[in-house]
Image (cartoon, rainbow, N blue to C red):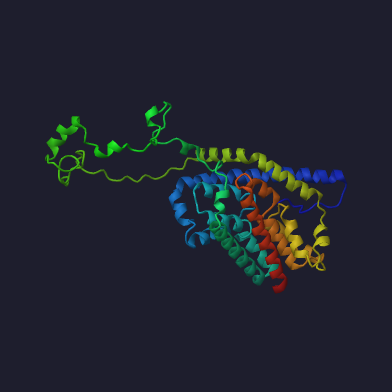
Amino acid sequence: MSPDFLAQNGSMSDQLLSALSMFVYLMAEISILFLVISSLVGVINQKLPKEKIQALLGGRGGRGYFMAAGLGGLTPFCSCSTIPMLIGLLKARAGFGPTMTFLITSPLLNPLVIALFLPVFGAKITLIYALLALSVAIVAGMLLQALGFERYIKSELLEDPAAQASCCDSTKAAPADAAEESCCAPKAEAKAESCCASEPVAPVIQRMTPVTAEGCCGAAEPAPATSCCGDSQPKAEVKTKTKIDWRKAGREGLSLYRSMLPYMALAMAIGALVHGFVPSDFFARVAGADNPWAVPVAAVIGIPLYIRVEALLPLVGSLVAKGVSLGAVMALTIGSGGASIPELIMLKRLFRWPLLLAFVVTILVMAIGGGWIFNIVG
């Protein structure tokens, strides 16, 4: 994140310059991260079959949720750079609930966050924070799965163009009488035919195997060394090592970046304006220790900001020195790190309104509840 957390008081021209420089910084940062992460996701999809991803991150049972939370805890992404990985999981048809668990966990809990939490807050607060992030993410993923919020995902961006070309697609138009049949579905009459049922090859088959009234090629049971169609031995299954197509991964990453670019530009512009025009002592005024609504206010204020948890933690000392309570600081940390207006703009490309609102409510509940807990235990 930029070294300047919030703008200092100054003239309008200074604030505009601060917002412009922040926009350039944010666009460059998110563009690089987005391209790199989305390309790496393309590589992972090449090496790791979708069936494997579905087995590891399936929505049934509890293992997929813990795996998703662990994956989120290992990926040091901010709320916006999590999007490429999210799209990759959705394209791979990972379980919806575990995918949402990953989305919540990834920006809030990773090794860098824990490394910064320990010296700033100590082991006790760090452990409570980690347990809070994990438990809320897992429970929220399970609830969204159980309530059927998967239907609010937009499928347009997740469709694989290659999947539209099936095994029997051709440029020629299909016959009119085949309209009721699927492209690759076998015809009903084909059940009676096998690879060696046609008459021209029958004499050849008869020379290789005895002819009886039963069996695919006329034999009651195929001879041990002979297959149905006369092959001397059944072909052994050949396992080939998947070779990474870096160009394909790069093209997929660039294509995804282009489709998301308008949303990213708007998101970063809003984030830059917030940074450019919000004064540095803003939180001290609205979330002071004497304000009983400090925790909810801090949580709500954190949502519009695009601040990484790692960038906010070094400023905790100055915020507490200005009278901001620990609970308000934690609510601000969870609210701004877990969600932001820039992230929500990008998620709107993937989610419909009910799912987007459910995600925001989850982060707000986690931020407010966590803030009150930290005021008690702190």
Q: Residue at x 80, y 59 (%)?
A: 283
**In the image, is 197 to the left or to the right of 145?**
left
3 and 103: which is toward the camera: 103
149 and 113: which is toward the camera: 149
> In the picture shown, does residue 28 fall above or below 52?
above
Q: Which quadrant holds residue 243?
A: top left
Mark yes or no: residue 363 visible: yes
What is the x, y in percent for residue 373?
69, 70
Q: Which quadrant holds residue 307?
A: bottom right
360 and 86: which is toward the camera: 360
**In the image, is 31 to the left or to the right of 225?**
right
Q: Residue at x 74, y 58 (%)?
A: 300
**In the image, is 246 to the left or to the right of 266?**
left
Mark yes or no: residue 313 visible: no
Q: Residue at x 64, y 66 (%)?
A: 129
Residue furthest out toward the bottom: 377
What is the x, y in percent for residue 177?
37, 29
Residue furthest out toward the top: 172
What is the x, y in percent for residue 120?
70, 66
Look at the image and tell me in which quarter the C terminus lies. bottom right
